[in-house]
Amino acid sequence: MVMKMIIPRKVVDRVKHFIGLNLYETQIWLALLSHGVATAGELAEAAGVPRSRSYDILESLSKKGLVVVKSEGRPLKYMSIAPEQGLDNLKRYYEMSSESFKDDLEDLKSSAVIKELGDIFKKGEMVMELPELIGLVREKNNMFAHIATILNRSKQNVKIMATPHDVNEINSFYIESIKEAKSRGVEVQVLVPSGTETGELAKYAEVRQVNRPITRALVSDGKEAVAMFMDPGDVHPTFDAGVWVNSSYVAQTLNKLFEEAWHE
């Protein structure tokens, strides 16, 4: 008889974070490690996971090389393998699936499917109301990833007001988006405080240093904007946040602030 698993939640969270499994996968895998061999039903009970989900979860764990299915008998039994070997298997799985996924995405970009998805998106845009044109973006990584997305669809000009911390983030992780925007003929202008080390950014954007406080913001084509309202030097990256607004009125208002500082 398989007893309910008693493993500290911090262990579950740590394994989930570092190995990249979802919560149910982590619970089932830890349950199997602690029992050696068990059926799907026994593992669901031990891990506190819905029985109806256990078969799909175990199939996923099997594909990732963390679980072995014993072929004899019914119901099927699942066997754990040594964690070290499991992590090697998981590493190979991620490497192979990542390459395959990248190829699939490239193929998808040139297929009829992407056009259909674009048509669906355009129809959705037409019926969006004001609350749907505003989005809160939390955490530094998510915010800069969203900014990179806006840069990738910019057509004419992008105006950025950035702190030294922001410039460092762009140079470290998002300079390719600036380079690609410039290669498409997009004019990129960046305002930073005096004394900011601009680094590689200055090669691909017109950067101007000013002696005034700067509002952290990005404006694209005078149509959409991201305004950030935390000082990145004062808060942990997980508390950084901004608001994305798809509004010409807001974008042009921020444009005026930018132009005033740019020409002072």
Image (tube, rainbow, N blue to C red):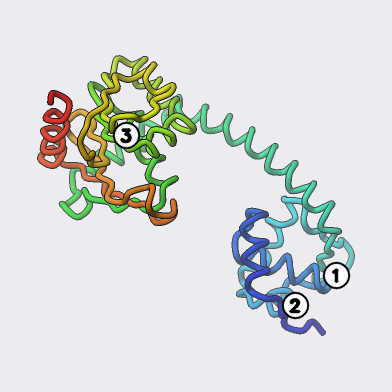
Q: CA distance from mark 3 to mark 1?
A: 49 Å
Disc 2 target residue: 42
| CA neighbours of label 1 inside 10 A, class few (<14), some (14 to 19), many (20+) | few
Q: CA distance from mark 2 to mark 3?
A: 48 Å
| CA neighbours of label 2 inside 10 A, class few (<14), some (14 to 19), many (20+) | many
Residue 219 x, y percent position in the rendering? 22, 34
What amino acid does circle 3 point to?
Ile
Q: Residue at x 44, y 36 (%)?
A: 169
Q: CA distance from mark 1 to mark 2?
A: 12 Å
Q: Residue furthest right?
A: 72
Side of 40 relative to 106 (left or right) = right
- Quadrant of the frame with the C terminus: top left
| CA neighbours of label 3 inside 10 A, class few (<14), some (14 to 19), many (20+) | many
Q: Residue at x 77, y 56 (%)?
A: 66
Looking at the rendering, which quadrant does residue 94 occupy? top right
Number of numbered markers:
3
Side of 56 relative to 193 (left or right) = right
Disc 1 target residue: 36
Between disc 1 and disc 2, the foreground one is: 1
What amino acid does circle 2 point to?
Glu
Q: Residue 140, relative to residue 239: is it above or below? A: above
Whether residue 124 is visible here, answered yes or no, is no
Disc 3 target residue: 150
Q: Residue 145, relative to residue 84: is it above or below? A: above
Q: Residue 149, relative to residue 124: is it above or below? A: above
Residue 20 x, y percent position in the rendering? 63, 53
Q: Are marks 2 and 3 in contact (CB under 8 Å)?
A: no
Q: Are marks 3 and 1 in contact (CB under 8 Å)?
A: no
Mark 2 vs mark 3: which is more N-terminal? Answer: 2
Between disc 2 and disc 3, the foreground one is: 3
Looking at the rendering, which quadrant does residue 167 occupy? top left
